[in-house]
Each structure stands twice: as C-alpha cells, then as structure tokens.
Image (spheres, rainbow, N blue to C red):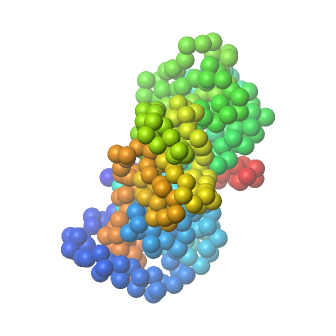
Amino acid sequence: MEVLDVLEIESEVSLPKRYSELSQEEMEARILEIKAKFGDRLFIPGHHYQKDEVIQFADARGDSLKLAQICAEMPNAEFIAFCGVHFMAETADMLTGPDQKVILPDLRAGCSMADMADIDQTELGWVKMQEIWGDTILPLTYVNSTAAIKGFVGKHGGATVTSSNAKKMLEWAFTQKERILFLPDQHLGRNTAFDLGVPLEQMAIWAPIEGEFIYDGDFEDVKVILWKGHCSVHEKFNIKHIENLRKQEPDTKILVHPECTYDVVQASDYNGSTSFIIDTVENAEPGTKWAIGTEMNLVNRLAQENPDKEIVSLNPFMCPCLTMNRIDLPHLLWSLEKLEEGEVVNQITVPEAVAENAVLALNRMLERS
C-alpha cells in the first residue's frame, strides 16, 4: 500500500468484484440515491482533472486549494468524499473541523510531483543548503506537495504558493530573505522567477536523489534553488508540438500551464493557472482556435463546454493524468456505500504536529492573496 509520510490511513479495503459487474447507469443511480439520502452531511469536491463520469457528481469544481477552502466553508458536511489526489485530501483535512471526515475513494490516487519531494530528502538537502548559504534562504512550496513538506516550509518561515499567486508569493519571499528554495516543481519555480527578472544563470537545481546541485556558476550568485521535481503530465508538452502547430495551424493560439518546461512556456502565446486557462477560453471570441497544454480531461471538457471555439490538446497523443484517473465510478460508489453502511473507508488525516506548521504555511499565503 502506498502511504505518504504524514498520512494516517484509517482503512483500505480492496474493491469488491461486484462493482465491476454493475452498469454505469446502475452506479450513477446509486450515487444519486446516496447523495440525496445524506443531503448536506455529504460533500463531494471534484478537481478539474477528474473524469466526466465522476465530475458530474461534484458539488463543487475547482483546483486543489479552492476545493479545500470550500470544504472548510461546509461545517455541516460530516463526510467529504474528495475526488482528487492525496495531497488535496490532506489540505482539506487540515482546513476542516475535527468532526469532519475526509475520504479518498481510491488511495492509489497520488501525485507524482508531490512524491518527488519527501520530508527526509528535504531535511537532508536543507542542511547542505545551510552549509553553503547560511540563513539566507526562505522555502516556498507549491500546494501540490505533501502535508509534511508544507509543514517543513511553515516551520522555516515560508509559505505555500499556487500557480495563480506564485509571482506575488515570490515577490514577498524576496523581501524576507536573499534566496528562495522552491519545491517541488522546478518548472513553475523557474518560469515564475524568470518573469520576476531573475536570470536563468542565477537559478540552481537541487537533485535530491543524487544529493547534489546542478549548477555551473558561483554559488554566491544563486538567487533561486529549484527542487528537481516536475509534473509528469505537463512535461509531455515540448517545443516540437508548438513548432508543428505554428506551421500547420498558424491562427491557433497556444495556451499552457506554467508547470510546462521553460522553453514551452516561452514559445506559447499565453500561460497561466488552471483557472486562467478556463477563464481565457470561456471569454475568448467565438470561432477562435486554441491548443492547450494541460491535462487531457480538462481540455476535453473545455471543448465540450465551448462548442463555439476549436479546442485541441497541444500534444495530440496526450493521455489524462493516470493517478487522478484512479478515482472512478466504482471507487466513488464503493466509498459512499460504505458510508451508508456506517463505515468510513480511506479516511485521510494529518497528524496535529504536522498540520500546525503546514497551516502556518497556508495562512501566510492566504494573508497575501
């Protein structure tokens, strides 16, 4: 069983075979029946990257932080069936009340990016960074990280960031310390710092597995330390996709997420958070053409919901996020039927000692957003 560092998992039961024998219509009818039975005691948040078969039951759609904040505004929701991945359920648990129970319908729904920075690696790397630069570094972490990493950042005076407010948070961080450690996504860190005027030559990469820096210059010149992590979905877009599209469809606008690599972001027409991508497409003129560099379920949904525009994936062979797709109808129904039977499965809880510092990091961001 895959368990993140700070997760206390109450239970995990294999999905009974009978769920694979139910039709989609049968599962949908049962989910609607259970939702009606529980009323406002049950809340189902759904991340934008979820499958259509699941997102149709979401009481709210959004990115990870927005959904966690909405959960915190639902005090009557005794049970929160979070249709997302591990770190999102962790954040929801930290922001909701002690009597609320957050469950993840399938514990295999993780995030490869979040898993690229574990707490042991981070603490070892921090020691080496202190040896080189002393007390001149402020850590920031993308919200796409484990609660343990958020807790580490909070303990050391840092904050979380989202793809929407990363620029603002880096600006704040530079008023606090001379250097920034950015975890766990090097691409969002690089793209944001570059937009703020930090040259690439002043960015070093920390490779946690090798335990060394990827950097050729003088360490005294370093302003940003990038953790060697990435999103396995957004790294699938490359400069060749843009070059081919420019030749074949020169009137198509290219819109990508800042988790994409530096060269892809620089070559695109627009880049921004998931919310920015959605708003840009929805507000675009009818008849415009868009190639979007983000997760496939979202791209397909945007195409369906904006039939007056031509919308395709920047990578024509793109697949949806595999871990996000672990949440499916059978697992959602199973977890809800267990609730109906009085059993809470796959509850996600963050230990209080970790949550205290992690919430510090979250609050430092929220105070400035």
Q: Where does the image place residue 368, in percent across and percent down from the top left? A: 76, 50
Q: Where does the image place residue 235, in percent across and percent down from the top left? A: 44, 38
Along the line of sight, the residue nearer the viewer: 61 or 84: 61
Along the line of sight, the residue nearer the viewer: 69 or 188: 188
Q: Residue at x 61, y 74 (%)?
A: 74
- Left or right placement of residue 34 versus residue 222 in this view: left
Q: Residue at x 79, y 34 (%)?
A: 175
Relative to 266, is 350 above or below? below
Along the line of sight, the residue nearer the viewer: 326 or 302: 302
**Could one spot residue 99 in this view of the protein?**
yes
Relative to 172, is 334 above or below? below
Q: Where does the image place residue 14, in percent across and percent down from the top left? A: 27, 64
Please tell me how many numbered marks the rendered image carries: 0
Q: Residue at x 47, y 54 (%)?
A: 311
**Could one spot residue 275 in this view of the protein?**
no
Relative to 30, is 169 above or below? above
Q: Where does the image place residue 79, in percent across and percent down from the top left? A: 50, 74
Q: Residue at x 43, y 28 (%)?
A: 209
Relative to 202, is 301 above or below? below
